[in-house]
Image (cartoon, rainbow, N blue to C red):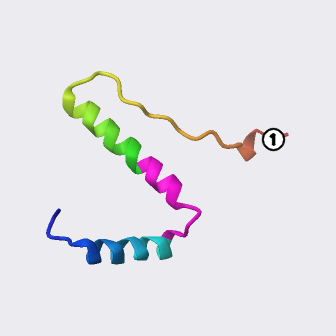
C-alpha cells in the first residue's frame, strides 16, 4: 500500500492520535467513511449522494 509497511502505518496513526486526540478520532473515522462511500457512489454513476450537516444550535436564533 503506497510502499508503507506496518511500522510506518503505526507511526502515522500515533501522530494522528496526538494531533487530533482520542475523542475526535471516531468523528474523523465516520467522516472519512462517509466520504469514501459517497465517492464510490459517485464513481458508479448513482444519482443520489448523501450530504448531511450536523444540526447545531444557532445562537442568532435565540431571543
In depth, the one of 4 and 57 nearer the eye is 4
**Image position, residue 34 (x, y; %):** 40, 42
For this orientation, the residue located farthest to the front is: 6
Q: Viewer-proximal residue, 61 or 40?
A: 40
The answer to which quarter of the image holds residue 38 is top left
Residues in magenta, as a range = 20-31
* Label 1 crowd (10 A; few <14 / some 14-19 / many >=20): few
| Helix, strand or loop status at disc 1 | loop
User: Which x, y percent locates residue 47?
Assistant: 29, 21
In the rendered image, residue 57, in percent from the top left (x then y), is placed at 71, 43
Residue 27 image offset from top left, x and y in percent: 52, 53
**Against 26, is 55 above or below?**
above
Is residue 37 found inside the magenta-colored segment of the image? no
Task: Determine whether 25 is above or below 5 in the image.
Answer: above
Q: Quadrant of the C terminus?
A: top right
Which residue occupies the extreme left position in the image? 3
Residue for point 39% across, 50% down: 32
Q: Residue at x 28, y 39 (%)?
A: 39
Q: How many marks?
A: 1
Q: Which quadrant of the rendered structure holds the N terminus? A: bottom left
Q: Would you name the residue on which mark 1 appears?
A: 62
| Point 28% across, 77% down: residue | 7
Is residue 23 in the magenta section? yes
Q: Residue at x 50, y 35 (%)?
A: 52
Amino acid at each position: 500500500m503506497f510502499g508503507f509497511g506496518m511500522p510506518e502505518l503505526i507511526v502515522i496513526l500515533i501522530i494522528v492520535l496526538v494531533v487530533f486526540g482520542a475523542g475526535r478520532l471516531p468523528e474523523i473515522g465516520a467522516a472519512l467513511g462517509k466520504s469514501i462511500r459517497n465517492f464510490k457512489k459517485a464513481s458508479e454513476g448513482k444519482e443520489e449522494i448523501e450530504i448531511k450537516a450536523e444540526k447545531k444550535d444557532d445562537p442568532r436564533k435565540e431571543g
